[in-house]
Amino acid sequence: MTAPAPRLTADRERCIGAGMCAMTAPEVFDQDPEEGLVLLLHDEPPTAHQAAARMAVGVCPSGAITLHEAEGTADGAS
């Protein structure tokens, strides 16, 4: 049995458009071409991209990205 994938959420109102998420995990995040704000491409990233997604959570300067672990705990940037 495979463990459920962690789930990501992105708060576009909190996002400052730094683009660290898109540079760190381009398979999971992008930036809106008009506003430069975060676009979440995969809210449940495939296993191959989960490490990069976790890193993107940590490097987000505004804390706009949250990682919700399958067990129900959340690990987000402060």
Image: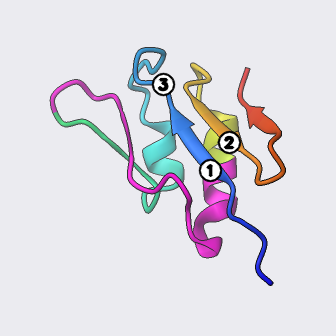
Q: Is residue 34 left or right of residue 64?
A: left
- Pick the quarter of the image with the C terminus: top right
Q: Is residue 47 left or right of residue 40?
A: right
Q: Which region shows up in magenta? A: 34-54
Label 1 to label 2, Cα distance in Å?
6 Å
Mark 2 = which residue? Answer: 67
**Residue beneath the point at 69% across and 55% down:** 6
Callout 1: few (<14), some (14-19), or many (20+) C-alpha neighbours within 10 Å? some
**Residue beneath the point at 78% across and 71% down:** 3
* Residue 36 place in picture, x, y as percent: 28, 29
Mark 3 = which residue? Answer: 11
Callout 3: few (<14), some (14-19), or many (20+) C-alpha neighbours within 10 Å? some
CB under 8 Å between callouts 2 and 3?
no
Callout 2: few (<14), some (14-19), or many (20+) C-alpha neighbours within 10 Å? many
CB under 8 Å between callouts 1 and 2?
yes
Label 2 to label 3, Cα distance in Å?
12 Å
Above or below, 41 against 31 in this view is: below
In the image, what residue type sits under mark 1? Arg
* Disc nearer the start of the sequence (2/3): 3
